Image (tube, grey):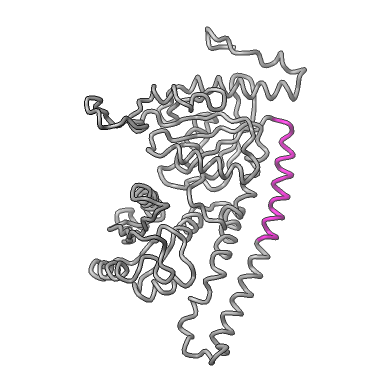
Amino acid sequence: MIEKKDIELEKTVLIGIITKDQDEDKSKEYLDELEFLTYTAGGEVVRRFTQKMDKPDPRTFIGSGKMEDVRQFIEDHEVGTAIFDDELSAAQERNISKILNVKVLDRTNLILDIFAQRAQTSYARTQVELAQCEYLLPRLRGMWTHLERQKGGIGMRGPGETEIETDRRIVRDKIALLKERIKTIDKQMAVQRGNRGKMVRVALVGYTNVGKSTLMNVISKSEVFAENKLFATLDTTVRKVVIQNLPFLLSDTVGFIRKLPTQLVESFKSTLDEVREADLLLHVVDISHPNFEEHIESVNKILGEIDSSDKPTIMVFNKIDAYKAEPFDDTDLEIEKTERHYTLEEWKSTWMSKVGNNALFISALNKKNLEDFKKRVYDEVREIHVTRFPYNHFLYPDYNEETGEL
């Protein structure tokens, strides 16, 4: 058995760009997230490189001068992997690999690798494999450079090209097979969902690593895997939950992320059927993250893509125990107070408290304000249930506002 201390993290460098559409602060934030992704995948970041440019270089992404700096650093420090913050074209990946002579990944490839590590069920593994095949298909040419000398003239007739075409056919056939397999599993899961009857369905949604699984464990008293890493949960987990005497189904779904690869959005749309068929969404937000507002926008964008943006939603701002406002000295009139200086009480009085009929502020880990959370969920679920089954309204009375009991 391998001791944890004996496992060496893979040494990596991160590479990003600063453009007119992505300023220095934004680039740093994306690289912070990329570093967390690298850590999740089992890597150690030894240095970051950024380059200011109008648009990515079509050949090397960051230009030959900066690429030489990266190559020299990699050679001097025995780094084995270079990770780029944006998706590389097949040609860029091929050119960069020749220059650096190390493993070259982009953000999409890294996320796919994490998904492959985390996939537990046959369904999740099938979806990840489909996304990987779709990512691989246009890049096959670069994997056959060892046969370049065997290619023919002009039309490059020869064994190398034949091998590429053979592989392309294999990958295309594999993609078709995986899509059929997913359709079959989708039908089985649709039957399972249909067998749950008319119970009210509630789905946890949100950015990755905001505490959805932790909240699920606290509310359902179950043991859903939770970890302070990105994409700890890939498979949708559904649990029956009872608050007071009112039962409903609660599902925990895969977290979202900015710059989510197109292949993964398409492959995992079927996983998000639990969200599409939910009666109520609990949009969980990590309020301690400095850019949580952008996380909200990213989640809302993906909800729109799966036709779920108009569902009843409760905004749940989690990790209030970890929130710290930046200190602000109002004696300096030249410095403007920004959102990063807001206290938790100030945030509560802003737009967010009005979203979804008053937002909730909790700490799932430390179980702060969970009674308020339970009461609110009970009220919302009861309203949906009574609308569906009017003759059951006497079974589920309203909360007593003064005592907090039924």
| Quarter of image, res 146 | bottom left
**Depth order, front residue of 6/21:** 21
Q: Quadrant of the N terminus?
A: bottom left
Which residue is pictured at 56% across the width and 21% down the height? Answer: 376
List x then y, in percent, for residue 145.
46, 81
Q: Quadrant of the C terminus?
A: top right
Which residue is pictured at 64% across the width and 33% down the height? Answer: 311
List x then y, in percent, for residue 208.
47, 43
**Residue furthest to the right:** 391
Q: Describe residue 303's horizontal placement relative to residue 65 as left or right.
A: right
When the figure is inspected, residue 396 is found, relative to residue 315, above or below; the finding is: above
Residue 186 falls inside the magenta stretch: yes
When the figure is inspected, residue 341 is found, relative to residue 300, above or below; the finding is: above
Q: Describe residue 241's horizontal placement relative to residue 324 as left or right.
A: right
Residue 326 falls inside the magenta stretch: no
Which residue is pictured at 39% across the width and 38% down the height? Answer: 289
Tally of numbered tags:
0
**Depth order, front residue of 20/229:** 20
Q: Describe residue 101's horizontal placement relative to residue 171 as left or right.
A: left
When the figure is inspected, residue 30 is found, relative to residue 174, above or below; the finding is: above
Q: Which residues are magenta?
A: 179-199
**Residue furthest to the bottom:** 153
Which residue is pictured at 67% across the width and 16% down the height? Answer: 396
List x then y, in percent, for residue 299.
53, 41
Main secondary structure of the magenta stretch = helix
List x then y, in percent, for residue 271.
62, 48
